Amino acid sequence: MPISPNQGSTGGGTTVIITGTGLSGATAVHFGSKLATITANTATSVTVIAPSGSGTVNVTVTTPGGTSNPLAFYYVGAPFKAGLSPVSGVTAGGGTVTITGTGLSTATAVNFGAATAVPTVANDSQLSVIVPAGAAAGSVGVSVTTQGGTNNGLSYTYVDGPTAGTVTPDSGPASGGTVVTISGTGFTTTQSVAFGAVLAPFGVINDTTLSVVAPPTPDGDPGPAEITVTTSGGNATAGFTYIAGPGI
């Protein structure tokens, strides 16, 4: 006489189907000492709503013909989430987030706001999930649903990818030192600015403005350099030209 599922929340409420023979006219289904609510019944199955409980209990079906053999049902506590990493990513989604905690082994879904993703469970204390696309930039609640219930309390921040527009001035000496203003969008979470392969010191003025000091070229020669602005939402590029100093 199979039971499916054979585990559920300690708070009760799990829909359980018990299959077998001679089950018509079921008058009671016990989960341990507690009665379950019968919602459907045929000669080969009984559908019930599990009561609250804890640990492992025996499930039996009582009909006018007697009481069945017991089946094991396992109560699972609600998951506890300790943290997630990383805590932000692009609005388009696609990044992988790791969630740690306890009671995660039966996780079936992870919600980022209203968007649902299917997790890959590593063990009871860790799972990973590919972040779905967000509706807009901003923070959303993250919830994990398991056989034991749903737990909330974490948040994830969607970040729009940056854009780089005007570079002022857009040229300077190969020796570096030019203070450059870059206009664009999505600069609040800027992590680095590079001229070619050389990192430059920078300051975030606001979400649309960066102040950057152009570094010297690696070989001291003039020429074009691509400016790459890296944020938690992705990269944006712009152009800069190193010019030769005067010679006599």
Image (cartoon, grey):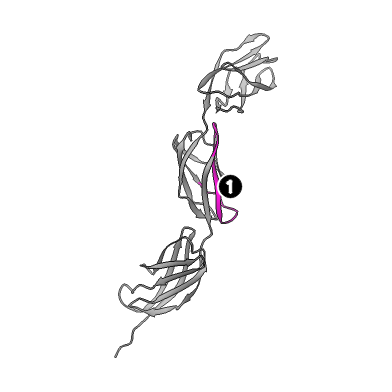
Q: Is residue 21 left or right of residue 170?
A: right
Q: Residue furthest front?
A: 205
For badge 1, the amino acid type reads Gly
Residue displayed at 38% across by 73% down: 214
Q: Which residue is mark 1?
A: 113
Q: Position of residue 41 (x, y in %)?
A: 69, 20
Q: Position of residue 142 (x, y in %)?
A: 54, 44
Which range of residues does the magenta coloring cover?
130-151
Q: Residue furthest bottom?
A: 248
Q: Residues within 10 Å of mark 1 (few under 14, many from 20)?
A: some
Q: Position of residue 87 (x, y in %)?
A: 47, 50
Residue displayed at 68% across by 9% down: 64
Quadrant position of the N terminus in the picture: top right
Residue displayed at 52% across by 28% down: 76
- Given residues 90 and 209, the one toward you in this image is 209
Where disc 1 sits, the SS reads: loop
- Given residues 188 and 109, the one toward you in this image is 188
Judge whether residue 136 is colored magenta: yes
- Given residues 112 and 83, the one toward you in this image is 83
Q: Is residue 31 left or right of residue 178?
A: right
Q: Residue furthest top?
A: 65
Q: Is residue 211 left or right of residue 140?
A: left
Q: Position of residue 26 (x, y in %)?
A: 68, 15
